[in-house]
Image: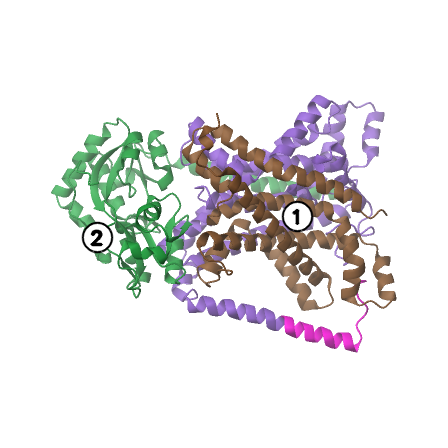
Chain colours: A purple, B brown, C green
Amino acid sequence: MSSVLYDAQGPRAKRRNILLTVVFFALLLALLWWVYQGLNDKGQLEWAKWKPFFSGSEAWTTYILPGLKNTLIAAALSMVIALPLGAVFGIARLSDHVWVRVPAAIVVEFFRAIPVLILMIFGVALYSQYTSVSSDDRPLYAVVTGLVLYNASVLAEIVRAGILALPKGQTEAAQAIGLRKTQTMTSVLLPQAVTAMLPAIVSQLVVIVKDTALGGAVLTFPDLLSSANTMSSYYGANTIASFTVVAVIFIVLNFSLTSFAGWLEGRLRRGKKSTGAVVGAEAVEDIAGTAHTGAAGTTGAAGTADGTAKTSGTPGASGTSGTDKAAL
Amino acid sequence: MFDFLEGYDLLGAFWVTIKLTLLSAVGSLIWGTVLAALRVGPVPLMRGFGTAYVNIVRNIPLTVIILFTSLGLNQTLGISLGAHGFSHINFRLAVLGLIVYTSAFVCEAVRSGINTVPVGQAEAARAIGLNFTQVLRLVVLPQAFRSVVGPLTNVLIALTKNTTVAAAIGVAEAAALMKDMVENEAQLLLISAIFAFGFVVLTLPTGLILGWVGKKVAVKR
Amino acid sequence: MKLRKVTAASAAVLALAVTATACGSGDGGSGSGGGKKIKIGIKFDQPGIGQKTPQGYSGFDVDVATYVAKKLGYSADQIEWKESKSADRETMLQRGDVDFIAASYSITPERQQKVDFAGPYLLAHQDVLVRADDNSIKSPADLNSKKLCSVTGSTSAQNIKDKLAPKADLLKYPTYSACLNGLQNKAVDALTTDDSILAGYAAQPQFKGKFKLGGFKMTNENYGIGVKKGSDLKNKINKALQDMVADGSWKKAVDKNFGPAGYKNEPAPKIGDIKS
């Protein structure tokens, strides 16, 4: 891969690069060695601590898989509930009526400004004090509530970006053939926007899966992460081993979701039939962060949408998207 | 109405949240930029490291990273980052964990910023004989940063909210205090409103001010 | 063409989500199938007291609860075990999530205001667990210069901080097993909670000979069986506990669960005899 940031390498540059490679490799190796030594000294690499995961299935069937199942249930439930809710709020923010637009904007910005953990802690206390949800379900309800409130507002922004990313001609054509506003939205804009948003939605699923771990660590939700706790008390405090296994499962799960989102995005961008508008995975991180777009009012989000529309118009050529692999 | 607040150090807890945010922000800006430089640089091994780092870290829950700093680095490898006493040690570990996590996102933001700088800029820089580090330091990064104020603001706001995860290793920040309070006091809605308000106050001005700054400094093309 | 593929892809995502939720709801239904059930709250992560294992549940609290349930007319397979974390116990009883709780549950005046207790069925004491080769901790006061680990929501840690060793450096984790890791690696010097719980950890095969109890008897912890306030279960459970001591089952359960740990337990307490 040649980059515009540096010249084609001559003999001196090549030698320097080899030197850099060697030094960097040595540094990495030293770090790894240090970690290995440290763990080995403390007996963390003893086979006894890792055995439960590699010989026999009892560690998996008793602790890990039930935990993973709960993590997936919470993530899937949150997504399924948050998606329609987000769509409603996203569309409401595009409304022509101020009395719809403004309250929707306030709700969305409010929940995006609050940490998920705060929402979850609120959820747990809410369900235990004001409802008859049993103690088994309460952590799940609380985790899902927190995730839904937060992610619905993020999805609202994604939906809005997806609709705004569509070429203006779509709305104009719909109006020209006499469709009402609702009809324009439901039969022209939304179907296209949903397709455009798919990669962003899958990426948001990664965020949700990661956030379920909060419920395991701070609340009493029996998710994948908390299964590591129960497990390590039974297998003689193999804390490092348990947490490593759990971390690897998270990485594999999320990495496949991320790759799927990337694949989907590439596919949609290449597709000729659609309008070519795609809300990429990168847009999620922008949106997920912030009160920034909303702070600037309705025009703010158009910024995100503009960016996406620009890149998607002629794929690769404008090169403003972070997903384009060219270095510059 | 607010007498239940007595005995709780509300401002102290939010001050810890602010300190966590600021220290981690500075740290992850530096480390994230270094990572971005590695990722666009000429040395394949460094590029590979940068890519692997970002892909791994982005896919682990922050909670797991923070727990690892305590259980792994501190309790197993004996690192205490020069602090004495667990309240100090865990605070520093939380900052470290937040930097490790957030820098992956900073790296991606900076890299997308580098992508917005027109090719001609780098070509011109190379034409006058600048080498890779000079091209990056003198020409590309200054422009890239100006165009990524927006995305970086989002990362900063996400970071502010993510500091609550430090509660998992017992750092006495806002979420830890809130959990304590809702378990011991009856005014659930009021307590939640106070903490929600606290975070809105922390994040909204950040978004507004930096949003304005971003527009100001953006390179007009 | 492309659109159809995209629709197929989105259908796949949806299908994935639906199956994930479907297996979730299916699981919820299976619990209530087998006639009358009794719901008992225990600990899931305290070896020797209440621990979830691949073979089911084991520990002294589990044995006591099983015996009591039998006397109340429930066989072992009619018991539904629930995890009751320390901070959740009163709420679970008040709301009727469980019928009773046997989860290293000390009888205290504060708790008695919210729930009723049957028993006590075991007298334990707050103690510390230290490394077997560490002879520097001879009295609670020695903890002043030491690193101490406990769990969030535990009264033991606060007790040491408030009364016995105010200068101890306190670390709190969600579970004891996280503390054990640090204790083994010398990142902390002592782990504090009830000696009955500590003995269970010390007796785990992986830790044989590595840890020892301080033997300080810093407090009296009267383990009771918590029931909802005003519940008529209290008297029935008291009766069952008396039987358990009388017919030797209590002794058997003690030997089985605490024997390997070499834990010198106190004799069976009399019902209602709460040592402060």
**The stretch drawn in magenta includes residue A10:** yes
Q: Is residue C8 left or right of residue C170?
A: right
Specify the segment rendered in magenta: A1-24
Amino acid residing under circle 1: Ala
Q: How far apart, in angstroms, are the residues tagged by discs 1 and 2?
A: 54 Å
Query: Which of labels 1 and 2 is toward the front?
Result: 2
Task: Using the image, determine if residue A149 lies above or below residue A25.
Answer: above
Amino acid residing under circle 2: Lys
**Residue located at (57% from left, 48% from top):** B19
Kindly identify which residue carries mark 1. Answer: A261
**The stretch drawn in magenta includes residue B120:** no
| Viewport quadrant of the C terminus of chain C | top left
**Percent position of residue C40, x then y:** 30, 37
Q: Quadrant of residue C83?
A: top left
Can I make out residue C84 in this image?
A: no
The kind of secondary structure element at disc 1 is helix
Q: Is residue B74 left or right of residue B112?
A: left
Dot 1, how many residues are within 10 Å of its Cα: few (below 14), some (14-19), or many (20+)?
A: many
Q: Quadrant of residue C115?
A: top left
Q: Chain of mark 1?
A: A
**Percent position of residue A73, x then y:** 51, 41
**Residue B108 vs residue A270, the one in the foreground:** B108
Q: Are marks 1 and 2 in contact (CB under 8 Å)?
A: no
Kindly identify which residue carries mark 2. Answer: C256
Can I make out residue B89 in this image?
A: yes
Q: Chain of mark 2?
A: C
> Looking at the picture, do discs 1 and 2 lie on one chain?
no
